[in-house]
Image (cartoon, rainbow, N blue to C red):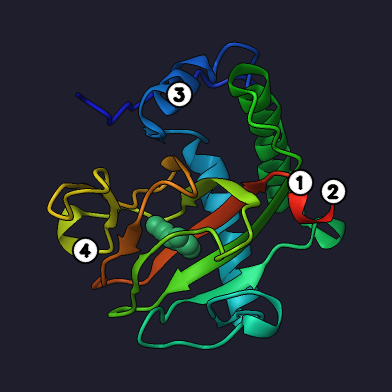
Amino acid sequence: MNTILPVILDDTPDHTLNAGRSERFIDALADVGWCVVDDFITPIRVAELRANLLASWEEGEFRPAGVGRGEKWELKPEVRTDRVCWLDPNQATPPVRFYLELMERLRNDVNRNLFLGLVEFEAHMAVYPPGTYYRKHLDQFIGVGTRTLSAILYLNENWQPEDGGQLRIYTDETDENRYQEITPIGGRLVLFLSARFLHEVMPARRERLGVTGWFRTRDMKHV
Ligand code: OGA
Ligand code: MN
């Protein structure tokens, strides 16, 4: 089955998702649990978000990324060596606000179509300096089932397959030799069900930029 589904979105003046636009890739998500959307945002919006990211980088706002949550959080350079800067919706610059609004639209569209009950969104900007990686992992924390849908938007300019840095998604739980490799080209959005797909970020020859987010469901532990 062809699971790569590039969708060119119409370029409307407000650059937001129209009703019906997301239906095509939400169908793919429903079918196979993941999809790739090319030109999710326009090159101008990609450039704005990238400039925003690089400004935060220059300001020293990025930190080495860790694994785990709360008291279990730790640096594990054998697992991941990227650097991240969490987005604070209360201090969002216009490009970040634009991105968060798009994700809010997407959240509503996915809920309407797939009944996933997504209630929250959290995201960080990520920089993978040359040679860095994030080894094979799942985006859900053990015992905490709230991260449900992962969304990664790449911000790289003129990225070539030989630059490396592919996102490798393992598409068959029973066969680790089956995977798809996704080149992190600017404007490309990747969506996948967080609990279902092991994935990894291959080392790149160039600095690799993106925004990674997770739609969460309510934490049922406290109900
Ligand atoms: C992550 C992740 C993938 C990517 O941050 O959890 O898997 O392509 N990122 O950047
Ligand atoms: Mn991940």
Say whether disc 3 or disc 1 marks the residue closer to the N-terminus.
3
> Residue 223 — which label?
2
In the figure, is residue 128 to the left or right of 109? Answer: left
Q: Does the rendering let one see residue 219?
A: no
Whether label 1 touches label 2, CB < 8 Å: yes
Amino acid found under the numbered disc labelled 2: Val
At horizontal 32% and vertical 26% (from top left) the residue drawn is 5
Q: Nearer the viewer, residue 27 or 45?
A: 27
Whether label 2 touches label 4, CB < 8 Å: no
Q: Nearer the viewer, mark 1 or mark 4?
A: 1
Quarter location, residue 90: bottom right
At horizontal 41% and vertical 82% (from top left) the residue drawn is 81
Q: Position of residue 222 (x, y in %)?
A: 83, 55
The local crowd at label 3, few if under 14, some if 14 to 19, many if 20 or more residues have their Cα within 10 Å, is some
Q: Nearer the viewer, mark 1 or mark 2?
A: 2
Q: Which residue is mark 1?
A: 218
The local crowd at label 1, few if under 14, some if 14 to 19, many if 20 or more residues have their Cα within 10 Å, is some
Q: Which residue is mark 3?
A: 30
Q: Nearer the viewer, mark 4 or mark 3?
A: 3
> Residue 164 — which label?
4
Say whether disc 2 or disc 4 marks the residue closer to the N-terminus.
4
Q: Nearer the viewer, residue 31 or 17?
A: 31
Q: Vertical placement of 32 versus 170: above or below?
A: above
Q: Nearer the viewer, mark 3 or mark 1?
A: 1
Q: Secondary structure at mark 3?
A: helix
Q: Nearer the viewer, mark 2 or mark 4?
A: 2
